[in-house]
């Protein structure tokens, strides 16, 4: 049986460090799970790829599973009063845009994954869910939606071009 979250974590571990930081991975159903991860890993939470749980399907051969994935890429932005132009030159240019580019390339070229229908991307400065799910840190984010298939092949090293 393929454990989707484990395979995604293996793929994210292929990402190089960005500005000296290793990308973290976690998954869950909502902001409550995200906040638990943030509070448990204070000071080591970012940059972060957060996979929102969703159903997966298999065509019956059990060597491949597919899922419509919502991945939220986060960095903490301590200067919350800055304009979006500042955020684009800092949070996005230095961390979030390269993270998204690496993920898309990894998903599209690895031996264990394939994108079924391209990707959808949304940049959300000053991201937070509302109500009880509101994030405990101030975050800038990219929401990356992909239709992703994961198989049980061996994971081979990649040479990334970003």
Image: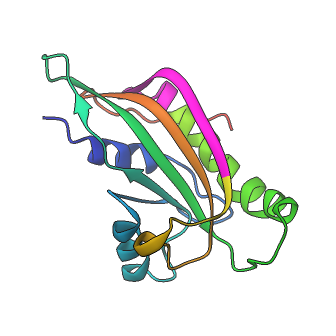
What percent of the width, then of the height, locates residue 48?
51, 61
Q: Give the range drawn in magenta.
A: 107-123
Asked whether residue 158 appears in the rendered view, the answer is no
Which residue sits at x=66%, y=34%? Answer: 161
What percent of the width, then of the height, locates residue 87?
79, 63
Quarter of the image for the C terminus: give it: top right
Looking at the rendering, which quadrant does residue 151 occupy?
top left
What percent of the width, then of the height, locates residue 110?
44, 29
Q: Nearer the viewer, residue 2 or 31?
A: 31
What percent of the width, then of the height, locates residue 132?
40, 74
Q: Is residue 140 above or below residue 119?
A: below
Looking at the rendering, which quadrant does residue 68 occupy?
top left
Quarter of the image for the N terminus: give it: top left
User: In this rendering, would 145 be left or right of 77?
Assistant: left
Q: In this view, does 145 lie above or below 61?
A: below
Looking at the rendering, which quadrant does residue 76 occupy?
bottom right
């Amino acid at each position: 049986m393929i454990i989707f979250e484990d395979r995604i974590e293996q793929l994210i571990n292929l990402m190089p460090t960005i500005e000296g930081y290793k990308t973290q991975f976690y998954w869950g159903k909502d902001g409550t799970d995200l906040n638990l991860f943030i509070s448990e890993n204070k000071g080591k939470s970012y940059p972060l790829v957060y996979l929102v749980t969703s159903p997966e399907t298999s065509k019956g051969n059990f060597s491949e599973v597919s899922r419509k994935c919502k991945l939220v890429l986060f960095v903490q932005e301590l200067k919350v009063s800055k304009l979006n132009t500042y955020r684009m030159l800092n949070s996005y240019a230095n961390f979030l845009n390269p993270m998204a580019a690496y993920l898309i390339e990894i998903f599209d070229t690895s031996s264990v994954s394939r994108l079924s229908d391209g990707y959808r991307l949304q940049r959300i400065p000053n991201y937070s869910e509302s109500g009880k799910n509101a994030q405990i840190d101030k975050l800038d984010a990219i929401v990356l939606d992909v239709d992703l298939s994961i198989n049980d092949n061996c994971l081979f090293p990649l040479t990334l071009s970003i």
